[in-house]
Image: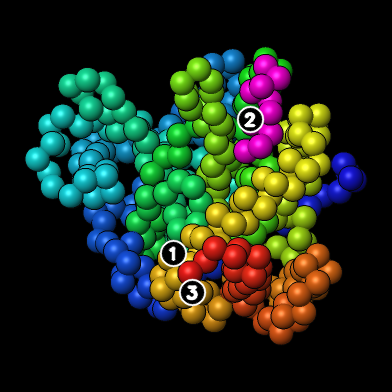
Amino acid sequence: MNTEEKLISKKKPSFPVNQALYDYLTEYNRNIKIPVSYEDLLRFAGFINVFDKKGIDTLWIRVYYSPYEQKEIDLSLKQMYNILHADGSESNFDTLNVDEIDYCTFGNSKPFRVKIRNVLNDNYTYLYIKKADASRVYGLELEDLLAPNHINFLVHKDTIIEEHVIGIPGDVFIEEKLADLTKEDRQRLSKEYVKFNERSTLRLLGDMRAYNYVIVPTYDFDRVQYRIRAMDFDQQSYEGNLKVYRPQFFKDNFPFVEMVQNSLQKESIEQYKNEERSILAKRLRGSKERIEDLMKVMRHDIISKPEYVDQLKNDLVVFTKDKNFKQCKTMGDILQVVFDFVVRNYESVNLYIIK
């Protein structure tokens, strides 16, 4: 493995959400009127830098608005919270408070992170407001349909609203938690990392560097189980290099790769990869109509460069030996062939399917 190879060298451009994708989102209740847009939040009057508990600049800034606009924006954000998490009513406005509005100054999406707190019990959650990008919309929808965990999001015109993905960022986990894991914990986390790596590859979700996913520990009787969830979807089916869709090849994931190599036998790794492929095939079969509707849109959408499409389909011909990739003209075409490949192989070996 070449530790010096730079897998992503340029910033991904943003792709517009076309009418066909808007129609799909409307059909499946993702396209809903919202009271405030991403552009509205950009009109802040000032900011202060946000530092972490160690005093390191997080590259987030805490923004504030003029007194008149602040009141209006706070009310709109409360309503947006209710639209995302409840029925959109205003009955609980008196018990909600907008504690913080932070703006990220790096990355592709440059999101706003809003902290909403219930003043009666101090429970709080975050929501994220971002500029709409077709790549991200496809990534979010595929995550909701095909990943182990659902994700709640809404789109309106040029704005995306997402719920917060709870967990410990992968880079923080590596730095603060990994060294203290027991042998049994490492084995359980290794299993999940193998599955996450396979899942990212099969759905062509790229750029799963350690800070783009979270580790979710869950207590189960006398042990801790681990899940890994993606939290960034900007690189859905964009890059041409197949390695971009395989988290194991990113340098900051090497501690996890080493953990897997030291914790699992080759036979176990293959078993967990096969389990993940089978689960994906079952989800594809179970959500067949909705997946077909989504892929009809994606196959006619331009969300990458022609040279990237050619590179990726050629890489996949070599990787899978499936010549159907040669006919692909878009990233949507490629992803459709991947899905067909997964389902076909699952159905060909599973003798217990009732047809």
Considering the whole magenta stretch, tell me its main secondary structure: helix
Residue type beneath disc 3: Lys
Instruction: Give the residue at mark 3.
Output: 355
Mark carried by residue 286: 1
- Density class for disc 3 (Cα within 10 Å; few <14, some 14-19, many ≥20) is few
Residue 330 sits in which quadrant?
bottom right
Q: Confirm whether residue 237 shows in the render.
A: no
Callout 1, which amino acid? Gly
Front disc: 3 or 2? 3
Closer to the chain start, of discs 1 and 3, is 1
Magenta region includes residue 142: no
Q: Which residues are magenta?
A: 182-192
Residue drawn at (65%, 65%) of the image: 349
Secondary structure at badge 1 equals helix
Front residue of this view, candidates 114 and 276? 276
Residue 77, given in percent of the width and then of the height, sits at 27, 43
CA gap, disc 1 to disc 3?
Answer: 14 Å
- Residue 303 shows up from this direction: yes
